């Protein structure tokens, strides 16, 4: 059921998820606004609570009406957790602003896209566009590839892991957008996601290495296997940049488009690999 649900969710996300209505991050804002104290323990307890509620829901539906209600819930949870939603609108707004040479609107949309990791101050245009590329690659990982990874790895309880990961992603985004770096540090969210992203980043990173310049990327990927300290964002984007080395880094429109194109290729490869592994496992 995992493969069937995954394909349906991807199709639904591409066709219908164009804003915040079907985005878990948006639905959780009501909860996040009420939180006034921040700690690692609170973050872990909230995440465990979300996962427990999801587990109990799936458990209660198991076996009912030939599991049709269970399938519907799987699809609904997948649509809520997988996909960038409003972030896609920010990307298209950036392209429109860049095509009109609207510096103010372009800067505003670029700030939205690079909100989590930011852009180094006083960087030149080339470095700025590279950081924008990196942000787009990371958005693709955070909203598509990593959720799909946990969804598939979880097997029969994939939605439980998916909801837990999506909740942490939403919490990090909320903290980055509305609260201070100190409160974000107190929450421990970055440390938790650093651990959870370790395996998915290496899995996605090897795809970037293979579809790019393998003579440079593969040694870097092997080196990353023993690296526990470098931020996962840096590991993933470093490998991706090997694949983008021959792409333009000076055009304000073509540079982000190159990153999105590369992200789509990677997503396609990952989905095909997951599908083949699932079919092979079923046949065996």
Image: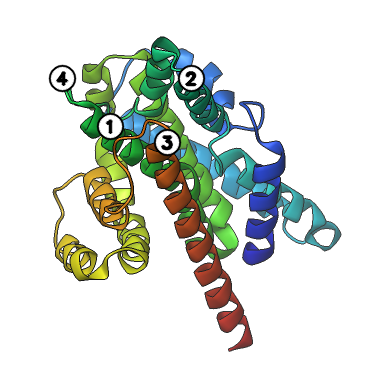
The residue beneath circle 1 is 40
**Residue 19, image x, y percentages:** 63, 27
What is the CA distance from the residue labelled 3 to the residue labelled 1? 15 Å
N-term-proximal mark, 1 vs 4: 1
Placement of 96 over or under 259, stated as above or below: above
Residue to which mark 2 is pinned: 97
Residue carrying label 3: 169
Q: Residue at x 55, y 17 (%)?
A: 30
Q: Residue 123 location in percent, x, y?
A: 17, 25
Q: Are marks 1 and 2 in contact (CB under 8 Å)?
A: no
In the rendered view of the protein, which quadrant contains the C terminus? bottom right
Q: Which mark is residue 122?
A: 4
**Which class describes the residues within 10 Å of circle 3: few (<14), some (14-19), or many (20+)?**
many
Q: Nearer the viewer, residue 211 or 197?
A: 211
Q: Residues within 10 Å of mark 2 (few under 14, many from 20)?
A: some
Among numbered discs 2 and 4, the one appearing first in the sequence: 2
- Above/below status of 206 relative to 33: below
Helix, strand or loop under label 2 = helix
């Amino acid at each position: 059921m995992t493969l069937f649900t995954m394909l349906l969710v991807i199709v639904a996300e591409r066709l219908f998820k164009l804003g915040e209505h079907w985005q878990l991050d948006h639905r959780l804002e009501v909860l996040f606004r009420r939180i006034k104290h921040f700690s690692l323990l609170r973050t872990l307890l909230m995440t465990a609570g979300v996962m427990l509620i999801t587990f109990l829901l799936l458990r209660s539906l198991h076996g009912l009406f030939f599991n049709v209600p269970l399938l519907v819930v799987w699809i609904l949870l997948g649509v809520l957790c997988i996909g960038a939603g409003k972030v896609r609108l920010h990307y298209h707004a950036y392209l429109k602003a860049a095509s009109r040479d609207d510096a103010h609107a372009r800067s505003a949309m670029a700030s939205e896209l690079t909100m989590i990791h930011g852009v180094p101050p006083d960087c030149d245009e080339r470095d700025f566009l590279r950081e924008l590329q990196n942000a787009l690659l990371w958005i693709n990982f955070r909203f598509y590839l990593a959720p799909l990874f946990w969804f598939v790895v979880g097997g029969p309880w994939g939605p439980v892991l998916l909801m837990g990961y999506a909740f942490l992603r939403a919490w990090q985004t909320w903290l980055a957008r509305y609260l201070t770096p100190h409160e974000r540090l107190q929450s421990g969210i970055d440390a938790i996601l650093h651990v959870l992203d370790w395996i998915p980043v290496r899995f996605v990173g090897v795809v970037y290495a293979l579809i790019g310049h393998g003579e440079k990327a593969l040694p870097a990927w092997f080196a990353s296997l023993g690296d526990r300290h470098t931020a996962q964002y840096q590991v993933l984007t470093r490998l991706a940049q090997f694949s983008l080395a021959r792409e333009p880094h000076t055009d304000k429109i073509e540079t982000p488009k190159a990153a999105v194109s590369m992200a789509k290729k990677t997503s396609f490869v990952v989905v095909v690999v997951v599908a083949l592994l699932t079919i092979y496992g079923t046949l065996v």
